[in-house]
Amino acid sequence: MSFQECWEEWEALDKDYQLLQETHKLYKQQLEEVIKLQNACLSSIERQKKKYKELSKSLERCQLPESEEQWRDTGFIQELMKERQNIFFEMEAFLPKKNGLYLSLVLGNVNVTLLSKQAKFAYKDEYEKFKLCLTIILLLISFSCRFLLNSRVVDSVFNFLLVWYYCTLTIRESILINNGSRIKGWWVMHHYVSAFLSGVMLTWPDSKMYQIFRNQFLSFSMYQSFVQFLQYYYQSGCLYRLRALGERHNMDLTVEGFQSWMWRGLTFLLPFLFFGHFWQLYNAITLFRLTNHPDCKEWQVSMCGLAFLVLFLGNFLTTVRVIYQKQKQREKNVNKQL
C-alpha cells in the first residue's frame, strides 16, 4: 500500500474511533439512568409491600363490615393485594437483588440477576440441558461401575462427579431463583442433602462395609438416573403445554419429585417415584444394620444411613402432601360444579 492509502485508512479508523467514543459515552450515561431507575423501582416495591402488609393487618383488626357492600369491598381489596404480591414478584425478577447466604458464600456480592427475558430463558434452558446430560453420564458410569469395573478409584471418580453435579445444581438453582424461578421447599433442600451424601460416600474408605453396600448403592444410582431421565422427558413436555396455555410461569423447571402441575398425564410416574423413595428407606435400614456389624468402624456408615433416611422422609412426605392437596382441590371443584 502507498502512504496515501495508509493515511486514508487511518482517517477512516479515526472517524470510527470518534464515533465509538460518543457511543460509549452515551452507553455510560444510559447505564447510570438504568441504575437510578432500578433503585427507584426497588425502593418503591419495598414501600408498597410494607404498606400492603400494614393494611392487611388493619383489615384483620377492624370491625366486621356492617353491610354486604362493605363485605364485597373488603374481599375485593384482599384479592387485589394477593394479586399485586405476585406482580411484585414478577417485577423483582428483572431487578438486581442481594444474593442469599449460599450465593454470597460461593460467589460473593456478584450480581447474578439477568435483565432480559432472552437471557433468563437461555440460562434456564442451559440448566435443563446440563441436568439431562449429566443424568445420562451418571447412568452410564454407575452401570459401568456396577457390572464392568470393580475399582475403588473408579467409584471415587463417580462419587466425585456426584458431588460436583449436586453442588453445581445448588448454585445454578440459586441463580435461577434470583431470576424468577419458583423453586422452593424440599426440592431445593433435596440437592443439598444429596451433595452431602455424595461427599460422605466419596470419603468412605475401601473396607468390608463399603464392599457390602457398594452394589446396592450403584444399583440405586442407576435406577435414580433412569427415573430422572423419565421425569425430564415427560415433565418438559408437560411444562411446554402448560406454558403455552398460560397456566405455568415461563421460568418453571423440571424437578426430581412430583408437583401438582404434573398431575395431567404424568401420574404414571408415581409408582416409579414411590419405588425410588422406599429404596432410599431400604438403603437407610441396610446401613443402620451395618453399624451393628463387628467389623464396622467407619463413621460414614451411620452418616450415609441418616442422609438416606432424610431423603426418604423428605421425598415421600412431600409427594404424599402434593397428592393429598390435589385430591382435595379436585373434590372442591366437583362440589362447586354440583
Image (tube, grey):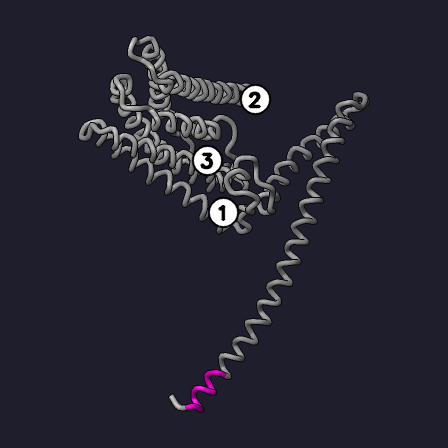
The residue that disc 2 covers is 336
The residue that disc 1 covers is 120
Instruction: Identify the residue at image location x=72%, y=31%.
Output: 53
Q: CA distance from mark 1 to mark 2?
A: 39 Å
The residue that disc 3 covers is 170
Percent coordinates x, y for residue 300 in the rendering = 37, 20
Is 134 drawn above or below residue 189 in the view shown? below
Q: Nearer the viewer, mark 3 or mark 1?
A: 3
Labels 3 and 1 touching (C-beta < 8 A): no
Q: Nearer the viewer, mark 1 or mark 2?
A: 1
| Residue 7 magenta | yes
Task: Pick whichever of labels 2 and 3 is earlier in the sequence.
Answer: 3
Task: Pick whichever of labels 3 and 1 is earlier in the sequence.
Answer: 1
Is 36 drawn above or below residue 168 in the view shown? below
Residue 182 in view in this figure: yes
Q: Nearer the viewer, mark 2 or mark 3?
A: 3
* Front in this rendered view, residue 147 or 321: 147
Is 172 drawn above or below residue 218 in the view shown? below
* Front in this rendered view, residue 256 or 244: 256
Q: What is the magenta segment's predominant secondary structure?
A: helix
64 with respect to 337 (left or right)? right
The N terminus, quarter of image:
bottom left
Q: Give the extent of the magenta segment.
A: 3-10
Percent coordinates x, y for residue 152 in the rendering = 25, 28
